[in-house]
Image: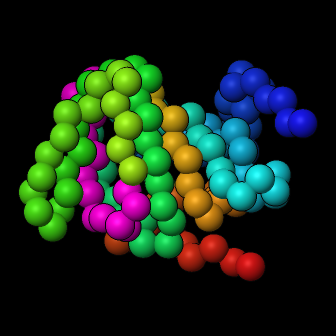
Amino acid sequence: MIVRYLEERVGTDFDVAASTWNSRRLLLKDDGVGFSLHDTIIKAGTETPIWYKHHVEAVYCIEGQGEVELVETGEKHAIRPGMLYVLNGHEKHLLRGATDMRMICVFSPPCTGQEVHDEEGAYAAPQS
């Protein structure tokens, strides 16, 4: 059994920040459960280009407002508490925070912990 508390991760190596987001990594590859789970803050007034070409990501909003736009089609979806989206087709997308948004993100395959987006908006390919 794994038990963790968010406050134990904040301000440690498991708390990874970028200019538009802050991701507190709660479960990672080394935990051996087959996915990773992150508690992420998307900053108000930001836009983040993302393309998880090596991962499937599920995102559940628990606080805040914003939108996700699929780059290829221009399709937009409002984000608000209780909204879930899954990037099961490795879609390139734009994530916009109208307010600070708190999102729970699940990645498969799991992240290792220190990933940040590269110039394409992707995380590096997982290593075996």
Left or right position of 12 against 51? right
- The structure residue drawn at horizontal position 35% and vertical position 44%, both measured from the top left corner, is 85
- Quadrant in which the N terminus appears: top right
Residue 63, compared with residue 73, is above or below; it is above
Left or right position of 21 against 48? right
- Is 95 colored magenta in this rendering? yes
Q: Which of 118 and 84 is in front in this view?
A: 84
Where residue 109 appears, x then y in whole percent? Answer: 62, 64
Residue 88, compared with residue 77, is above or below; it is below
Among all residues in the image, which is located at the extreme left? 74
Q: Which of 56 and 66 is in front in this view?
A: 56
Question: Quadrant of residue 62 in the image?
Answer: top left
- Is 29 colored magenta in this rendering? no
Where residue 43 appears, x then y in whole percent? Answer: 36, 32
- The structure residue drawn at horizontal position 11% and vertical position 63%, both measured from the top left corner, is 73
- Quadrant in which the C terminus appears: bottom right
Left or right position of 1 against 36? right
Q: Which of 59 and 102 is in front in this view?
A: 59
Left or right position of 39 against 75? right
Residue 25 in view of the camera:
yes
Residue 7, compared with residue 87, is above or below; it is above
How is colour applied across the structure in the image?
rainbow
- The structure residue drawn at horizontal position 77% and vertical position 53%, both measured from the top left corner, is 33
- The structure residue drawn at horizontal position 9% and vertical position 57%, both measured from the top left corner, is 74
Where residue 24 appears, x then y in whole percent? Answer: 61, 37
Report the number of discs: 0
Residue 16, compared with residue 53, is above or below; it is above
Where residue 53 appears, x then y in whole percent? Answer: 42, 72
Question: Quadrant of residue 51 in the image?
Answer: bottom left
Magenta range is 87-101
